[in-house]
Image: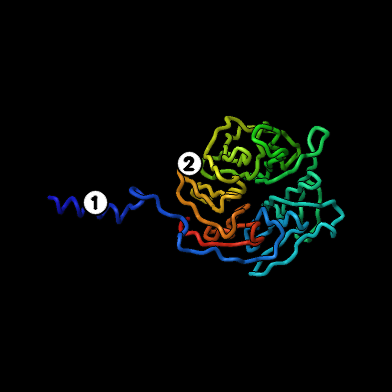
């Protein structure tokens, strides 16, 4: 009888190991592979859904395009009729445009494949945005973006805006935030997740029928650094670049820490999956001024 029970337990462990141990998503023995160096405060990687990754050089004034294992300059601030100073978060829309947070002049830019740049939005209620940081595009092409100002946990002047893709109407959907930073929408619960960096935590909101935000709640706390860019995989696991903490954290949809992966430098800024199978994770890191990639086991 004892032998039968033991064999049954072994069989369950073989068939369903996750019942007893949450599977690791990234092999901890792997090393990050550097794919581009010589960048200038890289941020906001965005995958075009085909073969290219775009990323900002926040302090350098240009956007890099990485494709076919080669890096080329996509947009330079001095080569555009539009005022461009410092881009940050990027997102590639299904409409074929690259959207960029440009915090030097407080605007959202839209860029086509011919490198033509236009101002998509530059203010709300008669005033300029403060310093657009990161953005996410929902299934209907609408944009949510963070607009922080003061980096102080006691000065709650950070905001989140919504831009309607059809009407271009801009709505203030959340305020009183402590430096809202990375932003994304979960494919599992449909909620909007935001890094509230000055309070070292990730918060989330319900998205209402009118595309507004409601029911803000804390999701996870990350002391010892700032939660910066965030990304989801198809299972709804949340990946967080922990700026100053030298790590990428992975959390389950329930907020359980699955894994912590050390990064090449202490200041990772943002993350993006760079293939349709969610098998390659890209990371921007500013202490080494480089773009890295690593393989993902699951998805």
Q: Which residue lies furthest to the left in this view?
A: 1
Left or right? Give the position of 216 relative to 77: left
- Front residue of 291/279: it is 291
First of labels 1, 2 by sequence position: 1
Disc ID at residue 255:
2
Residue bearing mark 1: 9
Q: Determine the secondary structure under disc 1.
A: helix
Residue 204 percent location from the top left of the image? 57, 37
Left or right? Give the position of 39 relative to 124: left
- Front residue of 148/243: it is 243
Residue 272 percent location from the top left of the image? 60, 55
Give neighbour class at mark 1: few <14, some 14-19, many 20+ (Cα, 10 Å).
few
Residue 197 percent location from the top left of the image? 62, 41
- Front residue of 6/149: it is 149
Residue 127 percent location from the top left of the image? 82, 35
Distance between the Cα atoms at labels 1 and 2? 28 Å
Give neighbour class at mark 2: few <14, some 14-19, many 20+ (Cα, 10 Å).
some
């Amino acid at each position: 009888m004892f032998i039968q029970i033991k064999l049954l337990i072994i069989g369950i462990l073989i068939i369903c190991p996750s019942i007893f141990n949450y599977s690791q998503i990234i092999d901890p023995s792997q090393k990050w592979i550097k794919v581009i160096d010589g960048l200038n405060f890289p941020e906001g990687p965005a995958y075009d859904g085909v073969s290219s990754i775009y990323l900002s050089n926040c302090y350098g004034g240009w956007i890099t395009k990485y494709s076919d294992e080669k890096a080329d300059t996509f947009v330079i601030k001095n080569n555009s009729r539009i005022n461009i100073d410092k881009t940050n978060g990027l997102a590639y829309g299904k409409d074929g445009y690259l959207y960029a947070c440009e915090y030097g002049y407080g605007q959202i830019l839209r860029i086509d494949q011919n490198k033509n740049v236009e101002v998509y939005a530059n203010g709300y209620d008669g005033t300029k945005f403060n310093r657009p940081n990161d953005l996410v595009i929902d299934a209907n092409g609408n944009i949510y973006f963070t607009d922080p100002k003061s980096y102080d946990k006691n000065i709650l002047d950070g905001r989140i805006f919504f831009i309607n893709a059809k009407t271009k109407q801009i709505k203030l959907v959340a305020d009183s935030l402590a430096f809202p930073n990375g932003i994304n929408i979960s494919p599992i619960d449909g909620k909007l997740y935001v890094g509230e960096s000055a309070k070292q935590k990730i918060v989330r909101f319900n998205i209402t029928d009118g595309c507004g935000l409601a029911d803000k709640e804390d999701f996870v706390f990350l002391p010892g650094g700032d939660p910066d860019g965030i990304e989801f995989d198809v299972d709804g696991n949340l990946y967080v670049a922990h700026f100053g903490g030298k790590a990428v954290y992975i959390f389950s949809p329930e907020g359980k820490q699955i894994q912590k992966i050390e990064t090449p430098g202490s200041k990772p800024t943002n993350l993006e999956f760079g293939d349709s199978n969610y098998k390659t994770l890209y990371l921007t890191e500013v202490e080494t001024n480089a773009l890295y990639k690593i393989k993902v086991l699951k998805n």
